[in-house]
Image (cartoon, coloured by chain):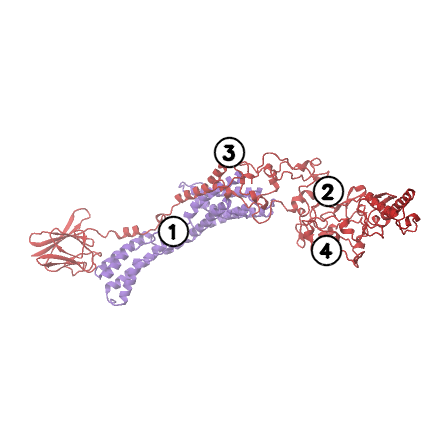
Amino acid sequence: MNESVVVYRGFRYLKVATLLCLLAIVLYAFHTPIGQPNGGSWLGYGLGGIGAAIILWLMWFGVRKRRYKPGKVKLEEWLSAHVYLGLALIIIATLHSGFQFGWNVHTLAYVLMMVVILSGSFGLYAYVRYPRLMTENRRGQTLDGIFTQIADLDRECRDVAMRLGDEVNDAVLAAAQRTRVGGGLVRQLSGRNPNCPTLAALKLMQKLAAGPRHDDAGVRKLVQLLAKKDDLLGQARRDVQLLAMMQVWLFIHVPFTFALIAALVAHVFSVFFYW
Amino acid sequence: MTILVSYLTKKQRGGVARRDIEVAPGEIRLGRGADCEVHLADPRVLLHHATISPRGGGWFVEAQGTAEMRVNGAVTGASSVRLGDRLALGPYELQVTEAPGHDFAITIELAAPLGDDLEQLKKRSGTQLRSAGLGKRAWSWTLAIVVLGFFLALPLAGFYAKTDAGGQNYMAGAERTWLTGSDIVWISGKIAGPHRFFGDNCEACHQKPFVMVQDQACLACHSGIENHADPARFDFAAFSGQLCQSCHKEHNASLGKAALVSQEQRFCADCHSGLKARAPATELVDVANFSPGAHPEFRVSVMGEGAKIVRASLDASPKPQEVSGLKFPHDKHLKKEGIRNPEKGMVKLECASCHAPAPGGIGLLPVRMETHCAECHSLRFEPKALDRVLPHAKPEQALMVMRDFYAGQALRGEVTDETAPALVRRRPGVPFTEPERLEALAWAERKALEVGDQVFGKTLCASCHTVTGGQGKWEVAKVSLTWHWMPKAKLFPHDRHEPVACVACHDAEPSTAASDVLMPSIKTCQQCHGGEAATDKVPSTCIACHEFHLPHLSPMRAAGGGSAMAK
């Protein structure tokens, strides 16, 4: 999935959503309820009903995308509609609220909805932008391929270091045995692994190569090998980072959707319970 | 003799490969270095890891520098070597055994191979968010349950915790607890100020679940709230089908305005801009808003002939006249040069000299003869007796005061009036005979009636009142003042208009007669006030001057049921 979701069929769902929003805005502008505009006027109930229906329909996308059997409507079309109708909710739900906010279940539902929409917007951005960055970063390789190269370099480094002093050997061994790509949430998202043993080994070799052992062919070789490994590590970490960015929003989008549904149920129930 | 060194290597398909070398006795170095007698080719071994050397007929092993070594499981830096000992150097295990033809044998086995670099790298690295402890399902459930718990289950449990088996809410007014007060999260907007004192008591108004707030809840306090129109004359007046809350929107003050009473123009104008079509029986004139031409001229309710109230427009011809029974020229009293006060000389009167605002600032206090008029208009009837004053508003008593006064004079004598009989003018102290006494009293009676005619009919009473009759039978016309000039409007808030001079609205200075109606025309108000949409005037909607529930009408809804009010 990429830009095609955005431009699907000449922005068909952008047009649908825009039309819906314009209709809501025009009605709101000419709507004059007694007192402040609020969710309890006929327009308020109407916008609330439409908003709730859209939310439930958008959730159905989660079910639909798990079906491998192709349906009448392409998944791409579903997603395009999902994106634009989801964005339309910002306007529909805000007008439904009549701009009245407070510390209550109603505003809670609104805030949760906004969190879902904003995380979804980031998801859209990620799906449009990151696949290209990933392709560029991988330079025709796979993450597994990069890992294989790193492991090969580790072996090669060790063989070279075997003949060298304990200080060099220890550094190379640590670089081989303790270097990580990614890891926890922060490491994956930041694309950085501070105190990387490979970098430390590279710096040591560079220091040695610039100093007393500048004529040691083994050390010079290690500088080359470790520098290449460091490059590959950077590439792998960037790949992991981009993949994490493409995934991480879903870990907000999905749980908050369920929180939103719960708040929506409480919102609708309480409004009619204390009618 | 030599030392046998055997390298054992596990084959991939099982079995063990063995490679033997012989080492000359003497100092034996073990390490990764190519120069070591016993070569241990693993990066986890130091270049020169340990040394085995003969010492005192036996053998001794010593680790080099920081190298790690275990002998029979115990970490040590140096140890003697005996047959059967097990040495651990890095990943290698060394077994010292007897060997025929050799001093001894060392069997070397790589106990902990390095392993697959790729597998280990993958194992160490986390490349999937799933592996970072994130999950969707657990968080979804957790968040949904927390939200449902705090925002649905808890308030609901709280509601039923304060409801008895019969569904009656017996806890109304009780102290809120964390449970019974948890429905605060359901509040849909700020409560209007006047309702806040019971505002945390949701069930004071929301008496039945899933039923809109019913009028009974409002009538618990607002029991007498009046109709908008007379239900006997207008069938729409009951507003049947409408609830109090159809117009009065509670929880709707979030934007800081008091939304409970609608101030909007259209709220009234929707009907009143074409009222005849909706209520043919109405006498009301159509009103659209307060801008010029959209609101009719004020119609004042004036006291008319026979104390009957007459309602007429201020621009009617002839102009409405107040028949108050009083005479009062405002112009004479408000003269620029002032008016003569018998004691203080020239005094300049102002409106406020007589018209004082009522406490609360809404109306004006009534003008009182004793307070406001008597200083100039004294009721002294006899120049020779300035301490004698007639009582106001009591003609019979006034006659008695005059009779008493002149009878006393007649009986005492020394009256200077030349028209009086000599008997009355005699020197005091001369005794009377009975016929003389009667004659003196007859004079006193005549004198009292004569002075009375003068006082009532000309000098005192008549300056303000219309007096008819004479000779002790004086009729002072009844005073009937208009109290509420515009009863269909709220009382005018004079206090809020304080910066404006009275005469800017009430044209009192040229008024020569008490019958003049000094109520200002609507044009006066419209100099400052405009309709709801006015941009250059004070935007004023109907509610600024009028009320929806008219105080003189019957209650709009019959109150019934128990009080829902709490606290």
- Spot occupied by residue B230 in the image (x, y as percentages of width and height): 70, 37
* Front residue of this view, candidates B245 and A27: B245
Tell which circle, 2 or 4, labels the residue nearer the N-terminal end: 2
The chain that hosts pointer 4 is B
> Depth-wise, is mark 3 or mark 2 nearer the camera?
3
Residue density around tag 4, few if under 14, some if 14–19, many if 20 or more, within 10 Å: few
Chain painted red: B
| Residue ranking furthest to the top | B166
Circles 2 and 4 on the same subunit = yes
Q: Which chain does the residue under circle 3 lie in?
A: B
Please state which of the two labelled residues, at mark 4 or mark 1, is closer to the viewer. 4
Amino acid on which the number 2 mark rests in the picture = Leu
In this picture, residue B418 sits left or right of residue B319: right
Q: Which chain comes out purple in the rendered image?
A: A
- Mark 1 or 2: in front is 2
Neighbor class of circle 1 (other Cα within 10 Å; few <14, some 14-19, many 20+) is: many
Q: Is label 3 on the same chain as label 2? A: yes
- 4 and 1 marks in contact (CB < 8 Å): no
Residue beneath label 4, please?
Answer: B501
- Nearer to us in this view, B468 or B502: B468
Q: Distance between the residues labelled 4 and 3?
A: 63 Å
Q: Kindly identify which residue carries mark 1.
A: A244
Q: What residue type is labelled 4?
A: Ala
Quick one: label 3 or label 2, which is nearer the N terminus?
Answer: 3
Q: Is residue A64 visible?
A: no
